[in-house]
Image: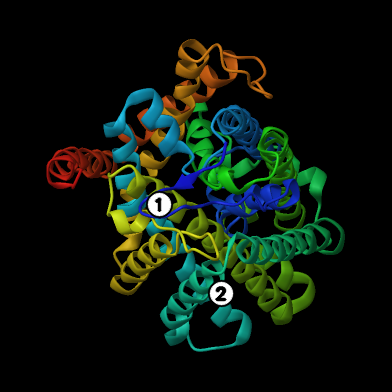
């Protein structure tokens, strides 16, 4: 099956991505700036180095379970659109529209804007530029990546592969420096932290929240499934192996932080990656890892632009978005107009400075989208039982049940701890219902 855009033209996607590029999209979609910046929060909510590592392993295994479920969905529907397509088939056009609505308005565009600002900030640090260059660099990054991806999925994939290899090298440099060169005491760091002996089980549950958010982004490869060669084999391999590689990187990076800083030192560090590198290499080390963070965030923006544009293209094809967004470039076979629209909105958010608040509101919606998409697997297994699938999720229905239940628990914790953000998220999603009704009424048939 190959996705087609048949809105006044006979142009469809072309399967040009191999398994390697698909796996790099998985890795690049997950590893952004979080692993370099956020581990201190997890350390503050855990009582020992072993507990901290257990949180990262648990989060990785849960995300791997979700990725294996997405692998079956990608095999069943190897076409552009990913979660949007699964929700449309299983739960109807309203559920699919609400996913696309929050994706465009907040989730994907807000994350692109936010991460591009992080890119600009660390590029300034790495190159010694004044911070007044942050927003121009962020906007320039989005415009540049839009231009690269305008010229076909191969151009975007080549850029993604290069950036992902560079970010893996940055992680490797961090691990080698922290574990072998910084001169810390890893065995002591793995033991109990005297400053945090009174933490409860509830605190560990709170530690899982930022861990899970750092593991997010594995579903981007499903949005480009219509451009993957031999998707029945390539998509499961990319999701499975890609997530295993991410989990190894995250655990090793945290070992480096613990070895160099200790558990309490990590809990008090505002920029642990820079602190580890500067302990061995001074200011040059801090600037080098700043460039590594810039490369990593640049790569995330690339895959987020690629994925979100495909979702909008399919929505336009279904009549649930502007019809012009459904068009593919006749030569490059890219959703160039949808790509430009996503980039324009992300640039607007970045320049306005509203993306940070939107991201606070969208976190729940992002994970609800994952859970809803994985829940469609039950529908496919029951209503499309006669379909032959080259890959089936192992331990079904256990894995999807565990994933959906855990996400429900995470959302419950967020509602309890941040009721304002949870309420705003629900309002944003709910606002899509009248918009959907109006769109269905006014859209040309």
The answer to whether residue 34 is above or below residue 72 is below
- What x and y, as percent, mark residue 351? 33, 74
| Residue 215 appears in the picture as rendered | no
Q: Quadrant of residue 251?
A: top right
Q: Quadrant of the N terminus?
A: top right
Q: What residue appears at the point 40 percent right and 67 percent down from the top-left corner? A: 340
The answer to whether residue 47 is above or below residue 274 is above
Q: What residue appears at the point 51 percent right and 29 percent down from the top-left corner? A: 200
- What x and y, as percent, mark residue 424? 23, 44
Q: Quadrant of the C terminus?
A: top left
Crowding at dot 2, Cα within 10 Å, few <14 / some 14-19 / many 20+, comes out as many
Q: Quadrant of residue 124?
A: bottom right
The earlier-in-sequence mark between 2 and 1 is 2
Question: Which residue does the numbered mark 1 point to in the structure image?
Answer: 313
- What x and y, as percent, mark residue 174? 75, 62
Crowding at dot 1, Cα within 10 Å, few <14 / some 14-19 / many 20+, comes out as many
Q: What residue appears at the point 53 percent right and 70 percent down from the top-left corner? A: 145
Q: What residue appears at the point 52 percent right and 14 percent down from the top-left corner? A: 381
Q: Looking at the rendered structure, which numbered label has been put on residue 122?
A: 2
Relative placement, left or right, of 298 versus 189 is left
Cα–Cα span, label 2 and label 1: 32 Å
């Amino acid at each position: 099956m190959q996705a087609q855009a048949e809105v006044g033209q006979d142009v469809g996607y072309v399967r040009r991505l191999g398994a390697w590029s698909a796996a790099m999209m998985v890795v690049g979609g997950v590893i952004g700036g979080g692993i370099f910046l956020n581990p201190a929060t997890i350390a503050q909510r855990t009582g020992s180095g072993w507990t901290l590592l257990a949180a990262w392993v648990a989060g990785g295994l849960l995300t791997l379970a979700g990725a294996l479920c997405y692998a079956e969905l990608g095999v069943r529907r190897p076409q552009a659109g990913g979660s949007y397509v699964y929700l449309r088939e299983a739960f109807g056009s309203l559920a699919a529209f609400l996913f696309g609505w929050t994706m465009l308005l907040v989730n994907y565009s807000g994350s692109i804007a936010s991460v591009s600002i992080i890119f600009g900030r660390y590029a300034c640090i790495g190159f010694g530029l004044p911070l007044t260059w942050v927003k121009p660099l962020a906007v320039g990054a989005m415009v540049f990546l839009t231009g690269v991806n305008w010229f076909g999925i191969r151009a975007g994939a080549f850029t993604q592969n290069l950036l992902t290899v560079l970010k893996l090298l940055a992680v490797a440099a961090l691990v080698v420096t922290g574990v072998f060169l910084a001169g810390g005491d890893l065995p002591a760091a793995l033991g109990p932290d005297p400053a945090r002996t009174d933490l409860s089980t509830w605190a560990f549950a709170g530690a899982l929240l930022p861990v899970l958010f750092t593991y997010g982004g594995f579903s981007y490869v499903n949005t480009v499934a219509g451009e993957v060669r031999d998707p029945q084999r390539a998509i499961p391999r990319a999701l499975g192996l890609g997530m295993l590689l991410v989990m190894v990187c995250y655990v090793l990076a945290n070992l480096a932080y613990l070895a160099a800083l200790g558990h309490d030192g990590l809990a008090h560090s505002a920029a642990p990656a820079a602190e580890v590198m500067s302990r061995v290499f001074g200011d040059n080390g801090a600037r080098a890892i700043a460039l590594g963070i810039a490369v990593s965030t640049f790569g995330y923006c690339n895959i987020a632009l690629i994925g979100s544009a495909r979702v909008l293209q399919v929505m336009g094809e279904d009549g649930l978005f502007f019809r012009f967004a459904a068009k593919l470039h006749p030569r490059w076979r890219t959703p160039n107009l949808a790509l430009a629209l996503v980039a324009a909105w992300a640039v607007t958010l970045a320049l306005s400075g509203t993306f940070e608040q939107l991201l606070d509101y969208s976190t729940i919606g992002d994970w609800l989208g994952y859970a809803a998409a994985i829940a469609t697997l039950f529908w496919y297994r029951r209503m499309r039982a006669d379909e032959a699938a080259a890959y089936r999720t192992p331990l079904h229905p256990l894995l999807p049940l565990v994933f959906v239940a855990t996400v429900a628990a995470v959302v419950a914790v967020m509602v309890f701890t941040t009721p304002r953000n949870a309420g705003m998220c629900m309002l944003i999603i709910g606002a899509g219902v009248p918009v959907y009704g109006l769109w269905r009424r006014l859209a040309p048939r």
